[in-house]
Amino acid sequence: MALPSKIPQSPSLDPTDRAILELLVEDGRMTNAALAARVGLPESTCAYRVRALRESGVIAGIHARIDLAAIGRPIQAVIKVHLSSHNRVHIDELFDLLVAIPGALSVVHVAGDNDFHLHVAVASPERLRDVILEHITSHPAVTKTETQLVFEVREGAGVLAPL
């Protein structure tokens, strides 16, 4: 018997698939045996469903959450980047450069006053300055940046939470 799901209904996911996803989001290292027991499926059926969710792209990957301070990157910032030119070549080129910056956690191409938001983790204020000067403002299409220090990060409810 599948666990009741809090995930909004989706035409491609049945309640058992949603229960599997909720449990894997909670603990991506859960064994197939434990997962099968929690959702009330035989282990072979559970393994088949997880494989199907991966093959369909619903499960895109399972990742480790790293303590950034523990690896020498205690300073986080969001750098907003404004471009002078919005042609596809400049945007694609800069996007590729931004995601390749050491310490880049995520890069988002956005609409509004800015064009990109870059979330970085660095070792020191000096390294943050160097990232901005060496990797961002040196690009000819960048007209300005605005840097915001991150004081604290908390995980959101995620996409599986009911609306």
Image (cartoon, rainbow, N blue to C red):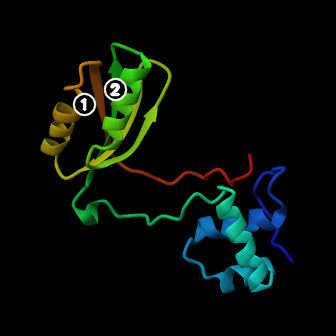
Amino acid type of the residue tagged 2 in the rendering: Val
Calculate the distance from the C-alpha at mark 1 to the C-alpha at mark 2: 8 Å
Check the picture and name the quadrant holding the N terminus. bottom right
Residue at the (42%, 16%) spot, across then down: 87
Residue furthest to the top: 84
| Residue 120 lies in quadrant | top left
Which residue corresponds to mark 1? 136
Residue furthest to the right: 1
Which residue corresponds to mark 2? 81
Q: Position of residue 121 (x, y in %)?
A: 29, 49
Q: Is residue 156 left or right of residue 84?
A: right
Q: Nearer the viewer, residue 145 or 84?
A: 84
Q: Position of residue 77 (x, y in %)?
A: 31, 41
Residue at the (48%, 27%) spot, across then down: 110
Upstream in sequence: badge 1 or badge 2: 2
Amino acid type of the residue tagged 1 in the rendering: Ile
Q: Position of residue 127 (x, y in %)?
A: 16, 44
Q: Residue 71 shows which numbered tag? A: none
Residue at the (34%, 26%) spot, across then down: 81
Check the picture and name the quadrant holding the C terminus. top right
Q: Secondary structure at mark 1?
A: helix
Q: Nearer the viewer, residue 143 or 7?
A: 143
Q: Is residue 24 left or right of residue 29?
A: right
Is residue 160 depicted above or below 22 in this figure?
above
Residue at the (50%, 22%) spot, across then down: 111
